[in-house]
């Protein structure tokens, strides 16, 4: 959105190595790379030796200290090396999405450089440190570091009412900007699409709860389910594969531009996640006029208000019943999906959110 508006925008990423780097993205965003972080098959790798003293370096420092010479490897030098890519970028506004351990490094840099740091919440789990201050969250992030990052943030970007209300109560002095998730809303179908089966889209991780989908498939053996599952947790993926029932078709991944067509062909969209912020898949289903049946998540309480579909509030037997109800495409469901389409058009349409986002960025950079 910022690049489209002609605002110079960069993205700092893990370094894929010389042959994997880009000079510019198709959208005009400037790619920047942080040498501390590399890429591997299962995700991002921290290249610790570049920024921390190795055993050999520590022995050298011990020897230098013994003979009265200054040591060469210090926490200050490691910090300087870690901050160097941030200084090199020279941004007037930094935006970090989600609370994780590496985000604290960015927050500390912004404090040192007196730069504006906007912390964007990716999901409700980002705020679990408020209710459980110790240990690590389901993704392995330190809750103590999450709290420190939040305290250092110049402002926070939220995507739902729960996040906004929680922060206003717990961090009343923190500037908060609410920005709903955007989506391009297509025109209403001239002819209703031919629909069949159910669609589940997500990562193969414990929060997305794919094992609940297996249990649903066993309860509704006549229902054909397409499961688009991007790799994430290898052990969980192997367990799912070993227990995959015949009525689930597993699809490893689908290009984003094709998901909307698949959503429009489905009778129902399924969500089994334990926690979300405001899932994009719910919006994608709404603009395709496909009802969502959610096991746990009711984003912003909209389902309780009669939008998007139905929520089973964690009851798996009720979940199966609600899926069967949605499959019937009754007049109640059709009216709900008409109202949902209108709601998304009014509150989540791409161009509307784009203007709000640009205004937010301009406010923060003044």
Image (tube, grey):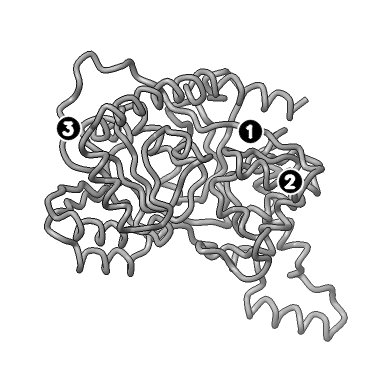
Kindly check if marks 3 and 2 are in contact, taking CB atoms under 8 A apart as contact: no
**Mark 3 burial class by Cα count in 10 Å: few <14, some 14-19, many 20+:** some
Q: Residue at x 12, y 58 (%)?
A: 246
Residue pushed farthest right? 68
* Residue 299 higher or lower than 363, as above or below: below
Q: Would residue 309 appear left or right of 346 to someone viewing this image?
A: left
Cα separation between marks 3 and 2: 46 Å
Q: Earlier in the sequence, mark 3 or mark 1?
A: 1
Q: Residue at x 50, y 62 (%)?
A: 139
Disc 3 or disc 2, which is closer to the eye?
3
* Element type at mark 3: loop
Q: Which quadrant holds the C terminus?
A: top right
> Residue 175 or 274: which is nearer the viewer?
274
Question: Mark 2 falls on what kind of element?
Answer: loop
Work out which residue is located at the far top of the displayed protein and give it: 190
Element assignment for label 1: strand
Q: Determine which of the numbered discs, if any, sits on residue 153 in the image.
A: 2
Which residue appears at 34% of the width and 44% of the height?
293
Quadrant in the rendering for residue 244: bottom left
Numbered disc in front, either 2 or 1:
1
- Left or right for 264, reference 343: left
* Label drawn at residue 12: none
Mark 2 vs 1, N-terminal side: 2
In the picture of the structure, the residue carrying the numbered disc 3 is 195
Q: Residue at x 27, y 46 (%)?
A: 323
Q: Position of residue 255 (x, y in %)?
A: 29, 37
- Near-viewer residue (25 or 329): 329
The x and y percentages for residue 270 are: 31, 46
Q: Nearer the viewer, residue 254 or 347?
A: 347
Q: Which residue is mark 1?
A: 178
Whichever of callouts 3 and 2 sits on the residue coming sooner in the sequence is 2
């Amino acid at each position: 959105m910022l690049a489209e508006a002609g605002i110079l925008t960069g993205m700092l990423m893990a370094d894929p190595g010389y042959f994997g780097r880009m000079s510019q993205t198709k959208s005009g965003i400037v790619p920047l790379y942080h040498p501390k972080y590399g890429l591997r098959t299962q995700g991002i790798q921290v290249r610790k030796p570049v920024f921390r003293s190795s055993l050999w370096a520590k022995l050298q420092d011990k020897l230098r200290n013994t003979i009265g010479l200054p040591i060469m490897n210090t926490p200050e030098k490691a910090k300087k090396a870690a901050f160097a890519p941030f200084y090199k970028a020279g941004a007037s506004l930094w935006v970090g999405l989600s609370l994780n351990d590496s985000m604290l490094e960015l927050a500390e840099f912004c404090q040192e450089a007196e730069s504006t740091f906007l912390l964007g919440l990716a999901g409700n789990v980002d705020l679990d440190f408020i209710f459980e201050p110790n240990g690590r969250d389901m993704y392995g992030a330190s809750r103590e570091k999450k709290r420190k990052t939040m305290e250092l943030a110049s402002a926070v970007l939220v995507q739902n009412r729960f996040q906004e209300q929680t922060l206003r109560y717990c961090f009343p002095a923190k500037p908060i900007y609410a920005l709903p998730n955007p989506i391009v809303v297509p025109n209403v179908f001239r002819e209703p699409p031919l629909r069949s089966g159910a669609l589940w889209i997500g990562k193969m991780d414990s929060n997305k709860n794919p094992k609940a989908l297996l249990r649903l498939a066993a309860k509704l053996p006549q229902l054909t389910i397409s499961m688009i599952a991007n790799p994430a947790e290898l052990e969980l993926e192997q367990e799912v594969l070993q227990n995959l029932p015949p009525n689930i078709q597993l699809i490893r991944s689908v290009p984003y531009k094709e998901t909307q067509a698949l959503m429009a062909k489905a009778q129902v969209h399924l969500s089994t996640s334990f926690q979300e912020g405001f899932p994009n898949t719910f919006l994608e289903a709404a603009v395709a006029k496909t009802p969502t049946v959610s096991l746990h998540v009711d984003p912003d309480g909209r389902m309780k208000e009669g939008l998007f579909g139905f929520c089973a509030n964690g009851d798996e037997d009720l979940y199966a019943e609600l899926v069967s109800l949605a499959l019937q495409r009754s007049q109640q469901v059709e009216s709900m999906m008409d109202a949902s389409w209108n709601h998304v058009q009014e509150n989540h349409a791409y161009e509307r959110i784009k203007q709000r986002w640009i205004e937010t960025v301009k406010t923060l950079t003044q």
